[in-house]
Image (cartoon, grey):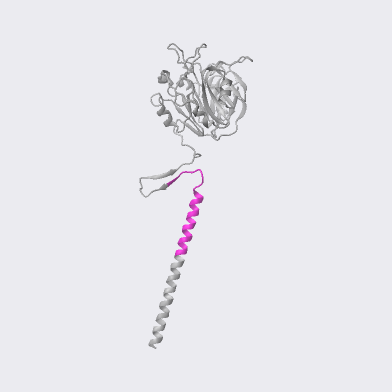
Amino acid sequence: MPNDHRHNKRQASISLFVLKLAALSITAMAGSFYATDRWFAFRDHVKPGTTTTVAQANPSTSVSAVTPDEPPVEEPGEADLLNPNAPITMVRNRKDGVPFTIVEGGTAGTRRSAVRVAVENIVQESGAKAGLNGTFFANASLNGTDNLLIGPSICGDESSPTFSPFDKRKELNGRPMVLMAPNRTKIVPYDSTNLDDEAGLRSQLPGMTDAFLGGVWLVHHGVPVNEDSIDQFNVKDAEDPRRRAFFVLLPDGRPGLGATTYVASSSKLAEALADAGIREAVLLDSGFSTSLVDDGKVLVTGHTAPGIPSRPVPHAIVLFDTHPADARLARVPNGRQPSPNSRPSGV
């Protein structure tokens, strides 16, 4: 009997050991399946084009992987949109009695001529597909030939921004400052205290290649400026009926160059553009300077009478099918400065 008792006790110990081993095996398998399931769930959750933060051993540091297609976060009072680099197309429209033409898509940039020339000449020299007369220039004299603009500016083929004494004028504050990068366009209210130097401009948009100061912020977040609020931009003759030139951003971020094919006030134009679904719109130098060019053809001029060319200008906004990466390597000769008695346009 004692031997049988010891034998039974040994058998029970072996059975208990086997049961414990099986339990441990099942637990390990369950943990493995759970970890694998969580890994796949995490992998599916983190999709391409999103931002992920990888924690480090030191909790005060982290590595943030930000992909280029992440939408920027717009601050109040600003517009900041990615450019989808869509094909360039031309659209004719008429809203609220205002007829206008817009060339949209591609990648927007700017070019400055050493002297004032026709917009089509600037477009041809830049290799762009389309172009529009640019912003207001400092010397508005019909006999002027210099290329100095009102407000800070830099073009895609220039190495550093250009500034002038006009940039410090308080009446320029609040005007739309347009900043461009190959994949992004940002518009901010101009502030002469912190945007009148290169560091201030570049801090607004890393990778900035182009910048210029517009006139009236015609449409912001789809809301048009009205007659009561248009005076805040201090643009002379903004409400006079004349052919108007403007830069736009569509809701999907596509840039566009536009011009009215008949005379209009800025507030009427703003209402028409908002009704047409434009997200952002900035008034450019208008009147006789208005000139919209696409594929080598002049679509709109600053004159209602046919056959009369628009006024030569020193600055143009252009649309490229693709942004020329080597454009930054070029240099534009310094233009002549305006005389002390020069009368700026648009001020």
**Tally of numbered discs:** 0
Chief SS of the magenta region: helix
Q: Say whether residue 270 is visible.
A: no
In the image, the segment drawn in magenta is 28-53
In the rendered structure, the answer to whether residue 38 lies left or right of residue 2 reads right
Residue 116 rendering spot, x and y as whole percentages: 53, 16
Residue 165 rendering spot, x and y as whole percentages: 41, 18
201 part of magenta stretch: no
Q: Nearer the viewer, residue 268 or 38?
A: 38
Q: Quadrant of the N terminus?
A: bottom left
Q: Say whether residue 201 is visible.
A: yes
Q: Nearer the viewer, residue 224 or 107?
A: 107
The residue located at (53%, 22%) in the rendering is 316
Quarter occupied by residue 121: top right
89 to 4, vertically: above or below: above
Residue 68 rendering spot, x and y as whole percentages: 49, 39
